[in-house]
Image (spheres, rainbow, N blue to C red):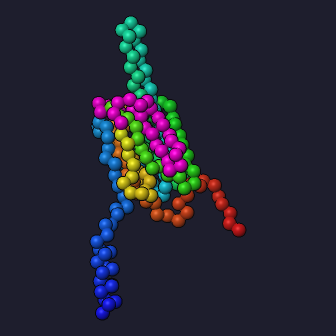
Amino acid sequence: MFSIVVVTVFLASCLAMPIQEPYSYSSAVGQGLGTPFVSSGEGRITGVRVWETNNNYYYYYYYYYNSNAYISGFQLRYGYTWSPVFGREGGVKQEMELFNDEAIVEVSGKYNPADYIGHLVLTTNNGRTLSAGLPSQISFNFYPANMGNELRLLSGRFNGVGITSIGAHWGLVYMEGAGNSTGNSTSS
């Protein structure tokens, strides 16, 4: 009789525990006009490329200065395979290859609600960052809702000039040997 009570209490406590969702989404920021995109691939993100365009205008007679920088495109590598370029390959390219067991755990930057994502910073669990564009306008900061999650994909919109909105999708990567090693290893 006592064992039935113990089993019943155990099962009731299991039902009372909240089930943690393995995925989360950071809502998109930006204007949101243009062609929608969603990056995807098998395994972990192992590399990132971001293109930034800087248009600086100077008017000496009217003392007007405008620094307009924006993210023109980006590309993610899953395992050994690069995704398509979202946006365009215009301007200066910034690139970061992730180390073994390194993952992107934060996406932040700035956006202009009237046009483009102006600054993009990708931060890894090792503290490394890739920063592109110029920081001006409205800030955003994306991170996973659950401990141990990492960036799985980016979504948003782009037009013929640049990225107009961006959102982040977080989750766990379930795979054997989930490291980002691009070299071969030998076992003894």
Residue at 34% from the left image edge and 62% from the top image edge: 21
Q: Quadrant of the N terminus?
A: bottom left
Residue sitting at the far front = 2
Does residue 166 appear to the left or right of 124 in the view shown?
A: left
| Residue placed most toward the observer, 160 or 77 | 77
Q: Is residue 66 above or below residue 149?
A: above
Does residue 89 appear to the left or right of 181 in the view shown?
A: left
Does residue 52 appear to the left or right of 25 in the view shown?
A: right
Q: Position of residue 141 (x, y in %)?
A: 38, 42
Q: Position of residue 80 (x, y in %)?
A: 54, 53
Residue sitting at the far top = 61
Q: Position of residue 56 (x, y in %)?
A: 43, 20
Would residue 160 be seen by someone viewing this image from the given angle? no
**The quadrant where residue 13 appears:** bottom left
Residue at 37% from the left image edge and 61% from the top image edge: 22
Q: Is residue 145 above or below residue 134?
A: below
Q: Is residue 21 magenta?
A: no
The mark total stands at 0
Q: Is residue 122 magenta?
A: yes
Q: Is residue 21 above or below residue 36?
A: below
Residue sitting at the far bottom = 1
User: What residue span does the magenta drawing correspond to?
Assistant: 113-139
Residue at 44% from the left image edge and 54% from the top image edge: 150
